[in-house]
């Protein structure tokens, strides 16, 4: 009798498991890999998406559509009307935002569904496109894999060499909510023959586009944010003791082997002061001017440090002028000067614009390559 | 002579049964609840909650020590007489029934939001009910073994969760005690409730084989729970920014959502499916003690019929009425208050009389 009940119960369990109404067969799903949001000239919201097509008969292996809608979820209805199967948002790799959209504050609310709907992935990379999204989604390069996969790879690898940031949706959410920093996302541009990584787009606290940090400055930003991550290669101009050569400039390139950052936060005379000690361990990979390394390596270290100091000062000034703090200095202000922070926390970028930031790089050359 | 000798529990099972009952839905919500009240200092409140729970647990074990072979229900009957004892038993059964129902409703709601958004709640409840019946019908010993097994099965979770640490911002935790001690004390109300589950000692104590380890065991169980909460809370605080974490209803699940491997995405789904095991180690003891109380009430030694009725009732209830998220919050609140009375107040109030009666009554019990 007992055995019998157990068999009956197990049977019921197994039969009911397939009864879950959430089942979705793969052939009924259209996996959107990249979605885009943009504004047209009449300030209407446009939503784009592209998804792979798994069919032997289809000649093109992707489908892409754009619809006009008032919200992200509403746009799904529009997509379901035209795409092969049911749009599924769990596999999105990229969320592309048009530059026109980013000129309007509070567009972030459009992404509410990303965080509210548990089925949405929060690991999509946030990207800004300088140009019209239409052009990007229509783009079908012959020498590249499917566009969405190509762009994902492009951003991931560019990020590995620190040419752009990789801000996933979850991280972007944090940056939007964190009072002590402003968000920053990757910036792309569709040129005639390719899609190009332009660097890092700076956004204000409300998400409005505030400027571009070029790849070579993004490297500096990334070093402050994450220390050594991926591969960091830097080429700097230094004043070498050379004759003037019109073609070959005085450049030295090196890998960064290690970064150590120490921030001292103080508040005096009505402003915040951040003294950032950055110790860099570098290994020279290219030197375009003659130099006696064995004798004068200290001198080269100082020259590099000086150049770093100059570049950092410029970058920070640029960010301060744009009323942004992509470095997250506000976190330090909160951690070490909580009383003063409380007064300015609701408008940290303005307080940061007035703050004094001193970056003091310390360079030590650990390697010189395989030639002298 | 021993009434419950057949079902004896080992010390490990005793610890993990109590620990399993304590760790439930709280793990998913506690980082937010603490952040709402005390910001990133909330983790300090956990220690206060732990201290309170340990104190009361020790009082409880001390109380149970007076009657080593009796559950709380037998003690009620002994001390309060036949009729008052019955009333106390009914109240006890109601408390456990409320706990089980609220717990199952909460679990179902989470599954409905995160995994099966289109499936009706009663199907999920029915799917829970079948394995629940299979485990609970085996009685105390099976539940104890089940809790132990689940504990070992879920040991990988903290390791995987540690991968989220690479994006942690430890600066969030500074400065310590930013707004003074008041918010920390307020938040400890929440933490005291999240240690609910040690009241299992009322029933589990007589089943314990080596009674000399009862006090140590319950302290270990509470401390294990503290470690779980502390780990989750600190990771969440370091990962999410303090202004953001209050936005999430279940921050712990959002944390799992971020973890991604080349070959595997959406670990939160897998985690949640596995977490159902942990949730079941809370639900099953509560279910068991509900039917244990009621079957004692009717003087029947077989709790299985009561269990069958209870589970059917819960499933039918889910079919008739699915609570909204606001109702759930209210229900959870009710459970919390009831827990405050049954787990915290009861031992503190009962300890004195029991101690005295034992003194006066000598050895007749």
Image: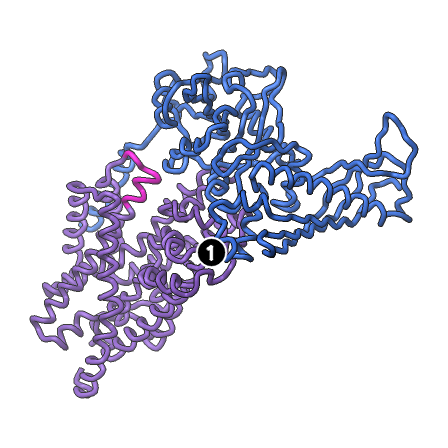
Chain colours: A blue, B purple
Residue at image coords 42%, 55% = B39
Residue at image coords 55%, 16% = A139
Residue A159 placement (x, y as % from top left): 62, 35
Q: Nearer the viewer, residue B70 or B349?
A: B349
Quadrant placement of the N terminus of chain B: bottom left
Res B272 visible: yes
Residue A222 placement (x, y as % from top left): 63, 41
* Image mark 1: chain: B
Residue at image coords 26%, 44% = B325
Give the dominant element type of the magenta stretch: helix, strand or loop.
helix
Secondary structure type for disc 1: helix
Residue at image coords 11%, 71% = B85
The count of marks equals: 1
Res B134 visible: no
Q: From the viewer's perspective, tell me whether residue A59 is left or right of residue A199.
A: left
Q: Residues within 10 Å of mark 1 (few under 14, many from 20)?
A: some
Q: Compared with residue B319, is residue B78 higher up or lower down, i.e. above or below? A: below
Residue A55 placement (x, y as % from top left): 45, 16
Q: Nearer the viewer, residue B141 or B345?
A: B345
Q: From the viewer's perspective, tell me whether residue A369 is left or right of residue B7.
A: right
The residue stretch that appears in magenta:
B108-118
List the residue tagged with mark 1: B234
């Amino acid at each position: 009798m007992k055995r019998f009940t157990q068999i009956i119960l197990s049977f019921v369990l197994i039969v009911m498991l397939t009864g879950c109404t959430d089942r979705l067969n793969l052939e009924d799903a259209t996996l959107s890999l990249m979605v885009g949001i943009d504004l047209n000239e009449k300030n209407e919201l446009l939503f784009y998406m592209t998804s792979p097509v798994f069919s032997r008969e289809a000649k093109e292996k992707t489908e892409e559509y754009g619809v006009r809608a008032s919200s992200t979820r509403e746009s799904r209805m529009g997509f379901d009307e035209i795409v092969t199967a049911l749009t599924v948002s769990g596999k999105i790799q990229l969320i592309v935002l048009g530059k026109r959209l980013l000129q309007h504050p509070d567009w972030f609310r459009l992404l509410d569904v990303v965080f509210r709907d548990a089925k949405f992935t929060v690991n999509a990379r946030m990207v800004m496109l300088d140009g019209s999204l239409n052009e990007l989604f229509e783009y079908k390069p012959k020498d590249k894999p499917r566009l969405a996969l190509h762009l994902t790879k492009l951003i991931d690898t560019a990020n590995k060499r620190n040419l752009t940031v990789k801000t996933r949706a979850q991280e972007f959410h944090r940056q939007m909510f964190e009072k002590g920093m402003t968000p920053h996302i990757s910036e792309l541009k569709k040129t005639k023959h390719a899609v190009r990584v332009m660097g890092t787009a700076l956004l204000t606290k409300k998400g409005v586009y505030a400027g571009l940090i070029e790849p070579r400055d993004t490297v500096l930003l990334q070093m402050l944010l994450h220390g050594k991550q991926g591969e960091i290669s830097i080429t700097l101009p230094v004043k070498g003791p050379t004759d003037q050569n019109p073609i070959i400039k005085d450049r030295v390139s090196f890998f960064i082997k290690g970064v150590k950052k120490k921030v001292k936060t103080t508040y005096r005379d009505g402003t915040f002061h951040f003294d950032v000690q950055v110790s860099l361990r570098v290994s020279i990979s290219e030197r375009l001017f003659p130099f006696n390394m064995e004798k004068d390596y200290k001198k080269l270290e100082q020259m590099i440090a000086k150049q770093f100091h100059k570049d950092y000062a410029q970058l920070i000034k640029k960010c301060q002028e744009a009323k942004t703090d992509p470095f997250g200095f506000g976190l330090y202000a909160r951690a070490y000067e909580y009383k003063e922070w409380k007064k300015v926390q609701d408008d940290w970028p303005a307080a940061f614009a007035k703050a004094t930031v001193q970056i003091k790089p310390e360079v030590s050359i650990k390697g010189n390559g395989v030639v002298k | 002579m021993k009434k419950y000798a057949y079902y004896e529990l080992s010390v490990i099972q005793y610890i993990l049964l109590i620990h399993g009952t304590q760790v439930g839905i709280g793990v998913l919500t506690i980082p937010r609840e603490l952040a709402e009240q005390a910001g990133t200092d909330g983790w300090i409140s956990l220690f206060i909650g732990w201290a309170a729970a340990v104190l009361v647990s020790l009082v409880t074990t001390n109380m149970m020590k007076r009657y080593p072979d009796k559950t709380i229900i037998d003690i009620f009957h002994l001390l309060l007489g036949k009729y008052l004892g019955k009333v106390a038993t009914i109240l006890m059964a109601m408390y456990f029934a409320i706990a089980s129902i609220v717990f199952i409703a909460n679990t179902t709601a989470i599954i409905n939001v995160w995994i099966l958004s289109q499936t009706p709640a009663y199907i999920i409840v029915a799917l829970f009910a079948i394995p629940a019946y299979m485990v609970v019908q085996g009685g105390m010993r099976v539940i104890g073994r089940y809790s132990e097994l689940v504990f070992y099965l879920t040991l990988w979770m903290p390791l995987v969760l540690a991968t989220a640490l690479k994006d942690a911002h430890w600066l969030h935790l500074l400065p310590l005690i930013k707004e003074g001690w008041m918010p920390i004390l307020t938040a400890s109300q929440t933490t005291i409730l999240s240690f609910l589950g040690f009241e299992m000692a009322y029933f589990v104590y007589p089943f314990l084989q080596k009674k000399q380890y009862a006090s140590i065991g319950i302290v270990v169980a509470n401390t294990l729970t503290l470690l779980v909460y502390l780990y989750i809370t600190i990771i969440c605080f370091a990962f999410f920014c303090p202004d953001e974490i209050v936005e999430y209803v279940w921050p712990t699940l959002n944390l799992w959502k971020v973890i991604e491997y080349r070959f595997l995405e959406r670990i939160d789904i897998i985690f949640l499916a596995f977490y159902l095991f942990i949730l079941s180690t809370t639900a099953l003891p509560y279910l068991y003690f509900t039917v244990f109380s009621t079957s004692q009430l009717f003087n029947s030694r077989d709790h299985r019929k009561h269990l069958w009725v209870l589970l059917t009732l819960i499933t039918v209830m889910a079919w008739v009425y699915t609570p909204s998220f606001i109702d759930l919050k209210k229900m959870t609140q009710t459970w919390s208050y009831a827990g405050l009375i049954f787990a915290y107040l009861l031992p503190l109030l009962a300890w004195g009389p029991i101690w005295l009666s034992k003194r006066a009554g000598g050895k007749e019990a």
